[in-house]
DNA sequence: ATGTCAAATATGTCTAGGACAAAATAAATG
DNA sequence: CATTTATTTTGTCCTAGACATATTTGACAT
């Protein structure tokens, strides 16, 4: 009976880990990992254990490590590597740590309540920069150390999204400028960064139109025309390969009218270098506020 | 200058259309479409026009057509096929058609207002079954005919999500039974069905915990334990291949404790046949209400 | 020691052509 | 007309190889 362990074929592993089939096969040849068993037709079957390792490896690669250093290491080895490398250990406020405790205790309702309290106390601006953003980093970090599971991160994201969406609804103003369209490119399915951008922009009295995630490039162009948007904002998480970000953004820029600004942000764009002209890279969220002001100044100067 | 038309490599096309690389290559061999140009290294480069056709084809396949019938047809041919085949043309109320007009006019704010009015007038139950659900079908249909673009559908989804999330927040009760966990499997990124399920279940006084989309199977199992969930609800859109649905659901069922109910729903499960025991397939949303009542009856009977 | 440039290596993604299982359709049976 | 069986269709997997791009290493000059 114990031979009925969980085995996944390569397609499932691709979806579960975000690592492509080609990559999985070439890793097997180059690094000897993952080393799946085979079924009667030589098809790969990955044990759940290796899939877990792959998920961890994916995350490590996302933060800049190289495959040769991490692919094939055992779970303990990976953890050892993790605890020594983080380097700069920011001091997290006790309040943030309390949020994390709520996540670990699976207290979704309590977490949401606490977040709403923090929002009301700090105001949206500080809430985003001093609570949500560091909390995201903290949670991502905890995930990396194995202190927080994927499903706990999912629950956390849901609460944040819920709180932010509610708040944004109350501060939206259709007469604001510039008119900003927000979305992500196909392949990028994280909406949290987008939502934080919308909140920040709305706070600066921009008029935001949220398109959700994964809008095809040609459709983005049409949407910009239809909404007469002044600015297109694209968000990229750290999970996006830098090469994909680069080619995607350049294709968008090429297809977009010249008078439409293109603002890109998120952890996935920080690795970008030599960004082409006509593309503005946002660092912290506050850059968006500055960009809005700069945009208005440029308009009043030209008009 | 005119030679700078948009060309996409196979990886981008996979992401933009949702059609896998292997499938794209084998279609080329079998049907002679898509027939991309090649770069200096024989790599495929797909013109934007073919990518548009592929998106249309993908949608047609999702509603049950066969590749041999649609792959390779020109845009006019596809449209001709569309307008004749729908067959059962349900009569849509003028109110629904007005919603569609708002979508086409890109009046996001007005649309949301109208939706909220409908919600207040009809109540959540009727709103879901008599407005949202038929509207989804109508929008999907209009998309198919080329009357609505992808970005317009995105905008529409955002408004629905916004309205539903707000409403759900107000009717959530942490003491309800059964305790239901909601999510989708990796590969399924549509959250709308999930949200509609949450609304319906909350209305039946179940206690819902939303995990968002794409939770890995092993994590779902852990989440069920952590939240002591009585029921796991998985949602599948029509875009999910039936085979993926089947294998995914069966793997979940195998990994789940026997006393946890597994409810699956959405357009993606209607194609399923010979469903294994321990898996309950939901048709219309109202099935969820019935399932909640049945669950409570079974509990009081056993306990 | 630090900066710059070129060579070497690492890495992901693409190619071809073939194979097979599962699903869907057509055909043959009761 | 309903069921079963054969046939076709279709997606996904396989191996093995190639190459562009990104990163690192090494050499050299500042």
Image (tube, coloured by chain):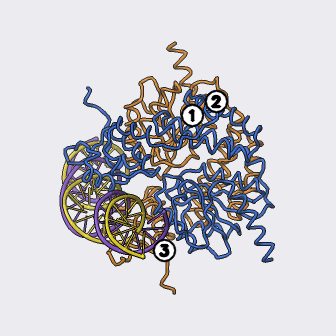
Chain colours: A orange, B blue, C yellow, D purple
Do marks 2 and 3 both belong to one polypeptide chain?
Answer: yes
Residue on which the image places disc 3: A49
Q: Across the whole image, how many numbered discs are drawn on residues?
A: 3
Asked if residue B236 shows in the view, the reply is yes
Q: Residues within 10 Å of mark 3 (few under 14, many from 20)?
A: few
Q: Up-down: is A266 above or below A224?
A: below
In-image side of A157 versus B83 (left or right):
right
Q: Residues within 10 Å of mark 1 (few under 14, many from 20)?
A: many
Spatial distance from mark 2 to mark 1, Cα to Cα?
A: 9 Å
Q: Residue at x 66, y 45 (%)?
A: A130
- Marks 3 and 1 close (CB-CB < 8 Å): no
- Marks 2 and 1 close (CB-CB < 8 Å): yes
Q: Nearer the viewer, residue A247 or D13?
A: D13
Residue on which the image places disc 2: A204
Secondary structure beneath disc 1?
Answer: helix
Asked if residue A289 shows in the view, the reply is no
Chain of the residue under label 2? A
Secondary structure beneath disc 2?
Answer: loop
Q: Up-down: is A108 above or below A206?
A: below
In-image side of A60 versus B223 (left or right):
left
Q: Earlier in the sequence, mark 2 or mark 1?
A: 2
Which residue of the protein is positioned furthest toward the top in this rendering? A303
Spatial distance from mark 2 to mark 3, Cα to Cα?
A: 47 Å
Q: Earlier in the sequence, mark 3 or mark 1?
A: 3
In-image side of B176 versus B163 (left or right):
right
Point out which mark residue A288 bears: 1
């Amino acid at each position: 009976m114990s031979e009925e362990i969980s085995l996944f074929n390569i397609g499932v592993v691709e979806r579960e880990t975000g690592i492509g089939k080609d990559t999985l096969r070439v890793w097997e040849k180059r690094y000897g990992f993952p080393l799946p068993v085979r079924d009667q037709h030589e098809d790969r079957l990955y044990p759940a254990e290796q899939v877990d390792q792959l998920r961890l490896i994916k995350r490590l690669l996302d933060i800049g490590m190289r495959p040769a250093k991490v692919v094939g290491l055992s779970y303990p080895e990976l953890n050892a590597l993790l605890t020594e490398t983080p380097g700069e250990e920011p001091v997290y406020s006790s309040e943030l740590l309390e949020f994390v405790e709520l996540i670990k205790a699976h207290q979704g309702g309590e977490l949401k309540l606490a977040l709403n309290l923090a929002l009301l106390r700090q105001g949206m601006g500080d809430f985003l920069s001093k609570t949500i953003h560091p909390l995201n980093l903290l949670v991502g970090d905890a995930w990396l150390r194995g202190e927080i599971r994927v499903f706990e991160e999912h629950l956390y994201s849901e609460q944040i999204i819920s709180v932010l969406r509610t708040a944004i609804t109350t501060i939206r103003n259709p007469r604001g400028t510039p008119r900003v369209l927000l979305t992500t490119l196909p392949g990028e399915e994280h909406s949290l960064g987008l939502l934080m951008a919308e909140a920040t922009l709305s706070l600066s009295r921009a008029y935001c139109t949220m398109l959700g995630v994964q809008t095809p490039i040609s459709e983005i162009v049409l949407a910009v025309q239809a909404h007469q948007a002044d600015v297109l904002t694209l968000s990229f998480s750290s999970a996006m390969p830098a090469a994909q970000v680069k080619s995607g953004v350049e294709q968008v820029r090429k297809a977009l009218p010249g008078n439409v600004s293109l603002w890109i942000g998120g952890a996935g764009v920080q690795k970008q270098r030599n960004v082409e002209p006509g593309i503005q890279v946002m660092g912290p969220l506050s850059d968006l506020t500055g960009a809005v002001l700069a945009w208005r100044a440029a308009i009043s100067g030209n008009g």
